[in-house]
Amino acid sequence: MIVLGIETSCDETAAAVVKDGRQILSNVVSTQIDIHKKYGGIVPELAARNHIENISLVTKEALNEAKVDISDIDLIAATQGPGLVGSLLIGFSFAKALAFSNQIPFVGTNHLLGHIYSIFLNDENIDMPFISLLVSGGHTSLFYVSSFDKYELIGQTMDDAAGEAFDKVAKMLGFGYPGGIIIDELSKKSKEGKEVFFTRPYPKSFDFSFSGLKTSVLRYIEQNRDYKNHIPEIVSGFQNAVVDVLLNKLFKLAETKNIKNISIVGGVSANSKLREKAKKISKEKGFNLYLPQKSLCGDNAAMIGGVASVLHKNEPFALNNEDVFSRFKFKKTPNL
């Protein structure tokens, strides 16, 4: 099965061609970072307009790079949500029209399930069930995954997502967007053992909360006039706190469920400290850790095409008349 995936949930216009759910024939991403950087964050209307300008060109490039024609495509899949409604509508409507005009089956795909599936694009054999930590600018969630079509939400953020907290702290310190990349790089310049310590927020259960941690950084800045002299130590301390909280919940859930297979996915899974510490703890505790390639951590269309080919492989295909959605509610399991 050859699937054309299209992703426009936020500020990346992406298209990819995936074969048999595992083999990436092409994966084209047009980012809008330079457009939104001067505003310190994503401007939804500008994001939607940019998708309109690029969606056709990006799709053509993905087909050309994969060396396939539209007639070779067995299924077209587009992100249906969650995300920015204006952005989602561009990719979803374009994909639906492309499918209809070429008489190709079309399906809408959940963006979060795409992220969870991204580890399978490494072409590894991963035993189920596994625990997946999905951490990005808009989501911080823990899932129990027992099969490709069965995902159980165990915990989620009660306020800011981890990636959102990174962006806000970077903005406090006068840095640009996206904050996660900037903080990750600055942290590497921190003097060992001199990192500023911030209290780790550990809500009961498997939920997360990063709003208080973000406020702690703000209070530190307000109370220390010389903070600009040791910014690497501030951001390193903040990053360490976020990483500790994320991994504490992940490994605690895996141990509670007695599951040895775990994954970390989403944009923040590209963070070097998170990857480094997760690998170290996994090795010490005997867990099998799966991480997506860094090129597949952020929003991309390969994950959309991949998960669509698996979820809809045995279904009779039909044009999807549903609309996009900005939010999606998984049925949350009572806290363990």
Image: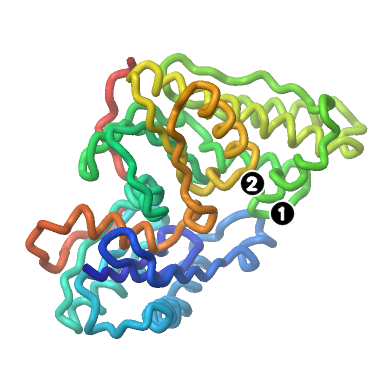
Give yes or no for contact between labels 1 and 2 (Cβ–Cβ under 8 Å): no
Q: Is residue 82 visible?
A: no
- Residue 285 numbered tag: none
- Mark nearer the viewer, 1 or 2: 2
Question: What amino acid type is highlighted by mark number 2?
Answer: Gly
**Residue 310 drawn at (x, y percent):** 22, 55
Q: Residues within 10 Å of mark 2 (few under 14, many from 20)?
A: many
Residue at image position (22%, 84%) is 71
Pick out the residue farthest to the left.
316
Q: Examine the rendered structure and indicate whether residue 263 appears above or below residue 295.
A: above
**Residue 174 drawn at (x, y percent):** 78, 48
Relative placement, left or right, of 327 versus 230 is left
Question: What amino acid type is highlighted by mark number 1?
Answer: Gly
Q: How far apart are labels 1 and 2 at the CA level?
A: 10 Å
Count of numbered circles on the image: 2
- In this view, the residue in front, 185 or 174, is 185
- Residue 176 numbered tag: 1
According to the picture, the residue beneath numbered tag 2 turns out to be 180
**Mark 1 falls on what kind of element?**
loop
